[in-house]
Each structure stands twice: as structure tokens, then as C-alpha cells.
Image (cartoon, helix red, strand yellow):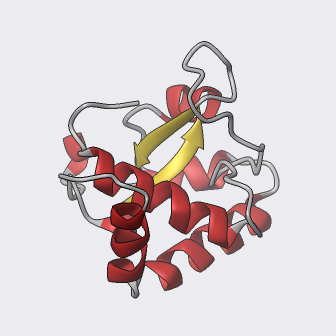
Amino acid sequence: MPRWICDQDRYALIIRDMESGNGVCTCAYCGEELVLGDSTSPASCEIDHKNPRSKGGDLLSPKNLVCACRHCNGKKSDMDFSLWMASLQGRAASEERLRVRDDLSNDWGRFVSASKALGYRR
């Protein structure tokens, strides 16, 4: 997992994305179930910027961050978000997963509190 984001926020994202996937953390793009804690797996949970930082995307905004599998994160790289979405198979399902995660981000404090309760600090 990246070091540019603190553990508290990283786990808040995972908790948010687990809630959006009925208790299972899934890739925001392909829907694959993510492996937590095994960075060698292709399904390893990585944090992706929907709108890349190189294209002006916000570094730490919860609405710009999603959990993604290594495969999707690597393929997307710094591709413009709208171009990436247009290239996806199963685009409607991806758009729905992203919409739910955006909606949940409106209550971001709840996920940070849950992360703190698990012992993660800034």
C-alpha cells in the first residue's frame, strides 16, 4: 500500500469500500474481491486516484480515492478518468460502484472514526 496516505485514512477507505461492497472490499473498476495485506497478489488492494494527480486530481480527497486491484490500477496508470471509464467492460457496474462510494464519502467522518476505533492513527 502507498506511503503517501496515513494508515488511518487508508483503512477508512477500505472500510468505506467494504461497506459499498456488502462487507467485501472490491476493486472499484472491475469488481474483483481484493486481497488485503498481500502485496504480491494481482488482486492486492491498492489506492488509486480516480482523477490522476498528474492531471490535477486531489491527492487526499475521499471522493478521488478508491480501492483498486493491482491490475486495474496499473492499466489505468495516469489515464484521464473519462477515457478509462469508456474503455472498461462492464462500465455500468463500475459506474454504480463508484457512485455508491462517492455517496458514502459524504459521511467520511464515520469511516475515519471506525478506523480510529481499530487503532489506526495519523
- Residue ranking furthest to the right: 90
**Residue at 58% of width from left, 27% of height from top?**
70
**Residue at 40% of width from left, 62% of height from top?**
115
- Residue 98, position as x, y percentages in the image: 58, 68
Q: Nearer the viewer, residue 110 or 28?
A: 110
Quadrant of the image containing the N terminus: top left
Q: Is residue 9 left or right of residue 13?
A: left
Q: Nearer the viewer, residue 80 or 14?
A: 14
Q: Is residue 20 left or right of residue 53?
A: right
- Residue 28, position as x, y percentages in the image: 62, 55
Q: Is residue 102 left or right of residue 9?
A: right
Placement of 42 over or under 43, stated as above or below: above
Q: Is residue 3 left or right of residue 83?
A: left
- Residue 27, position as x, y percentages in the image: 66, 48
Placement of 2 over or under 18, stated as above or below: above
**Residue at 67% of width from left, 18% of height from top?**
41
Please identify the quarter of the rendering in which residue 100 is found: bottom right
Placement of 21 over or under 108, stated as above or below: above
Q: Nearer the viewer, residue 106 or 7?
A: 7
Q: Nearer the viewer, residue 113 or 57?
A: 113
- Residue 111, position as x, y percentages in the image: 42, 72
Please identify the quarter of the rendering in which residue 12 is found: bottom left
Total numbered badges shown on the rendered structure: 0
**Residue at 53% of width from left, 49% of height from top?**
67
